[in-house]
Image (cartoon, coloured by chain):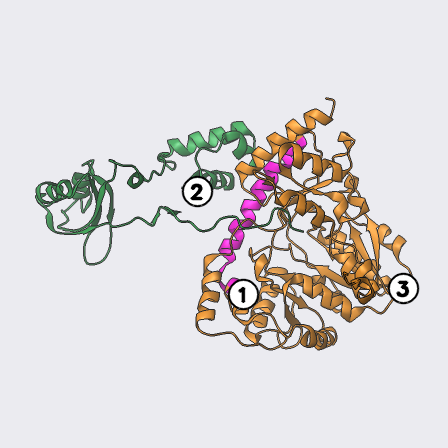
């Protein structure tokens, strides 16, 4: 007789929604000859000097725990980097925590902020994990839909319409996954006014900050009076091509980080020692390579956006990240059907927009973190696919 | 010579792969295709783009393997023309694949290619050493080419190891 494990499992775990990407991954994983525009990570390998530093660190025996918040030397480099690149000032001694990826930084943030029933505003389409992270911490995720007509930008009006007396925080991700939308200084300032008016905390996921193309990136924390209200989350994954290292960080006022640290020391202790040493090298000596990667993404973005618009998949020019979010409405398919049929018929993998929340329905996410040749071949295949579904 | 940013961008793309179409370059750089063609023509005329060779690994082809020697050459420069005259006398030989004037204990670094050791030996003893201003040569035979002009020749382990779909 098989044991019924159901009774051992928490209701919260059972009710958790599986990632909308998972199902699609299983479908694509077994296929040969697939061109994937479904990958949410750089196609670059981590720059060699960074890898070499961690190899050396491992041979030299840096295998112990570090301070919970991470090596002081790394925190100092993070603060110097944030100051140099984004004009924000944090103290390495008590305002920065090195985490196991930005994902853990988000988890730590919500566990620190939320009481049962507290509401967190999430701007949709949104990264797959946001709502679940809020729910797991006992909070209630409240979605704010954004629309293609407005380049998927959130406005103060949209935010105000969703605020209740339970609203505690708003999560902003700019540049955004999956839409690539970037909010400029004026747009963020307008949001800051609402934040102040309603006394909210801002969780600013700035993981794609290094991948901003048409105008300078603005960190929410750099806006007047916003330092004290911002939990800045960033990491090494995207800008430095270090996704598999799982290294992120939180920068926030010390009144918040001290509480976060309490949770962190019981859940994780610290990020891996030898990898933290590689991260120090990343911040000290890879700006040229980071720039090279930025430029390469910029070129590929331009190519893909033009090509998709040419074949009839309308999309806006995203200001950052490495995603394009075209509309597939004219095919009459749902975004899941579109993605499934495209994969089966033409072996091109994209991610259905619905995986990023209901407001992503009618769109698909195409990542351009793949070679120019692959992008061009993918466009040829998609054009052939569209020919079968759209009367032109 | 100072170049426009878009010319620099074009060079970057071509240096990586000169077979990229002008249409693709135009799309990547948000330029007009005609403009791209015009820039490339100008860069060719100005001698900034010198040529478009392919990098071929001849060592993989039976009967086409070559022996390459790196020769350190000490020379006596001549009044008025410095090293240029002797350099030209050397680089005009088709056996010479590259030639650099360098600082340090010798003057010219010459790479010489031949079908056999005998070819190399003959070239060095009869052609190179007999040039009047050449004082001495030291010959090193190349055993294996790992990286050439920024390109790793084989065993580049940086494959795409990403999963097909990630969040």
In the image as oriented, which residue stretches furthest toward the top?
A392
Residue A166 image label = 3
Residue B150, x across and y down, in percent? 38, 48
Magenta stretch secondary structure, dominant: helix
Q: Is residue A323 magenta?
A: no
Quadrant holding the C terminus of chain A: top right
Q: Chain of mark 1?
A: A
In whole angstroms, how far apart are the C-alphas of marks 1 and 2?
36 Å
- The correct choice, above or below, for A74 with respect to A386 in the image is below
On screen, residue B132 versus residue A239, left or right, reads left
Can residue B77 be seen in this snapshot?
A: yes
Q: Is residue A301 magenta?
A: yes
**Chain B color in figure:** green
| Secondary element at tag 1 | helix
Residue that numbered label 1 is attached to: A279
Residue that numbered label 2 is attached to: B2
The residue nearer to you, when weighing A291 against A24, is A24
- Determine whether label 1 and label 2 are within 8 Å by CB: no
- The orange chain is A
Q: Residues within 10 Å of mark 2 (few under 14, many from 20)?
A: few
Q: What range of the chain is rendered magenta?
A: A282-309
């Amino acid at each position: 007789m098989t044991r019924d494990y159901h009774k051992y499992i928490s209701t919260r775990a059972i009710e958790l929604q599986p990632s909308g990407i998972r199902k699609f991954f299983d479908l694509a994983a077994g296929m040969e000859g697939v061109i994937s525009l479904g990958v949410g990570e750089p196609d670059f390998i981590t720059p060699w000097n960074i890898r070499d530093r961690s190899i050396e660190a491992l041979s030299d025996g840096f295998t112990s725990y570090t301070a919970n918040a991470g090596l002081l030397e790394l925190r100092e480099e993070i603060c110097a980097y944030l100051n140099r690149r984004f004009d924000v000032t944090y103290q390495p001694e008590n305002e920065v925590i090195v985490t196991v990826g930005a994902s853990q930084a988000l988890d730590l943030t919500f566990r620190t902020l939320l009481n049962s029933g507290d509401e967190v505003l999430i701007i949709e389409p949104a990264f797959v994990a946001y709502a679940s992270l809020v729910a797991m911490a006992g909070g209630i995720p409240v979605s704010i839909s954004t629309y293609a007509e407005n380049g998927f930008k959130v406005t103060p009006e949209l935010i105000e319409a969703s605020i209740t007396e339970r609203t505690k925080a708003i999560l902003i991700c700019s540049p955004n996954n999956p839409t690539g939308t970037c909010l400029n200084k004026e747009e963020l300032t307008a949001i800051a006014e609402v934040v102040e008016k309603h006394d909210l905390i801002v969780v600013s996921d700035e993981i794609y900050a290094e991948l901003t193309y048409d105008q300078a990136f603005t960190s929410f924390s750099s806006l007047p009076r916003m330092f004290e209200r911002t939990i800045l989350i960033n990491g090494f994954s995207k800008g430095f091509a270090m996704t598999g290292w799982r290294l992120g960080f939180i920068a926030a006022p010390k009144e918040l980080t001290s509480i976060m640290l309490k949770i962190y020391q019981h859940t994780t202790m610290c990020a891996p020692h030898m990898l933290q040493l590689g991260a120090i090298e990343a911040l000290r000596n890879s700006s040229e390579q980071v720039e090279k990667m930025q430029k390469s993404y910029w070129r590929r973005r331009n190519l893909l956006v033009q090509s998709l618009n040419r074949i009839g998949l309308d999309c806006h020019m995203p200001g950052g990240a490495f995603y394009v979010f075209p509309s597939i409405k004219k095919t009459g398919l749902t975004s899941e059907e579109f993605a499934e049929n495209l994969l089966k018929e033409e072996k091109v993998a994209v991610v259905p927009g619905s995986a990023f929340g209901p407001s992503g329905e009618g769109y698909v996410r195409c990542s351009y973190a793949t070679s120019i040749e692959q992008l061009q071949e993918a466009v040829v295949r998609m054009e052939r696919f569209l020919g079968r579904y759209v009367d032109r | 010579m100072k170049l426009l940013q878009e010319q620099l961008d074009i060079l970057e793309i071509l240096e990586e792969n000169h077979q990229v179409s002008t249409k693709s370059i135009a799309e990547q750089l948000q330029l007009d295709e005609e403009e791209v063609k015009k820039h490339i023509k100008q860069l060719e005329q100005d001698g900034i783009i010198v040529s478009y060779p392919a990098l071929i690994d001849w060592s993989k082809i039976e009967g086409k393997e070559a022996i390459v020697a790196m020769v350190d050459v000490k020379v006596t420069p001549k009044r008025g023309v410095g090293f240029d005259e002797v350099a030209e006398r050397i680089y005009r030989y088709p056996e010479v694949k590259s030639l650099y004037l360098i600082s340090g204990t010798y003057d010219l670094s010459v790479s010489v290619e031949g079908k056999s050791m005998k070819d190399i030996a003959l070239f060095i003893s009869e052609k190179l050493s007999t040039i009047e201003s050449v004082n001495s040569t030291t010959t090193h035979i190349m055993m294996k080419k790992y990286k050439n002009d920024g390109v790793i020749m084989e065993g580049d382990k940086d494959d795409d190891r990403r999963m097909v779909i990630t969040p």
